[in-house]
Image (tube, rainbow, N blue to C red):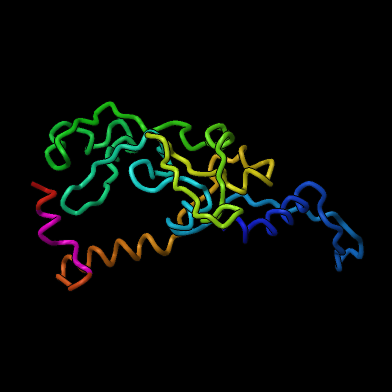
Amino acid sequence: MDVFLEPLMQDMNILWETGVQMLDEYRKESFTLRVIIFVTINDYPALFTLSGQFKGKLGCVVCIDGTAYVSLTASKKIVYMRHKCFLSKGHMYRQKKMDKYFDNNSELQSTAPSGNSKGKRVFSIVSKLKCVFGKKTKDGKPRKNVKPAPGATFKKKSIFFEYLEYWPELDVRHTIDGMHVPKNVFESVTGTLLDMKGKTKEGLNSRLDMV
């Protein structure tokens, strides 16, 4: 992906630092046009590709290394937990009597992660990462796969950090589009309620995970 984005990033760097001369047809005068990318809008796979963040256990784009997760052994999936931390302090779901409707873990005093995904913090994490692209070395031999260190959250330094000097200053750099998430949730809920083959989430594995 970075190979295809590099020409665009080079142009965006010029448009931010130098700008280009444009003509205002109405005023009949020239002006310097500057351009900034302040956010990308994409689905989850594209988000991880652009940001360089690992999927899976530490794949929450807000919590990053503070992600709380549970591995479902039967379904072989990962579920993110501790969502109550994003609720207000007096919310009814934080009450002890509501714990039985979740996973019996009290989150009365839990707080949302603060600053985990801010640009400067992420930049400090990825600034020393070295990523070698390509499946083969220069002499044509297959490149060895290097396993990430335990607890690693990013696999590469995003190309946005390489070319855009203002990128570390942005707290929200990548967002999820408003089409895929509602669509996927609707399909999953409807498929489960109507027991649609291939769409329902009800099955032996999901029941085993709930035991």
Instruction: Work out whether residue 2 or residue 121 is closer to the camera in this orientation and state it.
Output: 2
Quarter in which the N terminus is drawn: bottom right
Question: Which residue is situated farthest in the right direction here?
Answer: 29
Between 121 and 131, the residue placed more toward the observer is 131
Side (left or right) of 166 relative to 145:
right
Q: Residue at x 70, y 59 (%)?
A: 7
Q: What stretch is highlighted in magenta?
A: 199-207
Please provide percent x and percent y for residue 132.
Answer: 56, 47
In the image, taking residue 187 as reference, residue 155 lies left or right, namely right
Picture coordinates of residue 208, whole percent (x, y): 10, 51
Whether residue 184 appears in magenta in the rendering, the answer is: no
Residue 133: where, in percent of width, then height? 56, 52
Q: Which residue lies furthest to the left in this view?
A: 211
Q: Nearer the viewer, residue 88 or 169?
A: 169
Say whether residue 200 is magenta.
Answer: yes
State the residue lying farthest toward the bottom. 197
**Residue drawn at (75%, 49%) of the image:** 16
Q: Residue 45: percent from the left, percent from the top?
A: 43, 57
- Give the residue drawn at x 62%, y 58%: 3
Q: Residue 131 is drawn in which quadrant?
A: top right
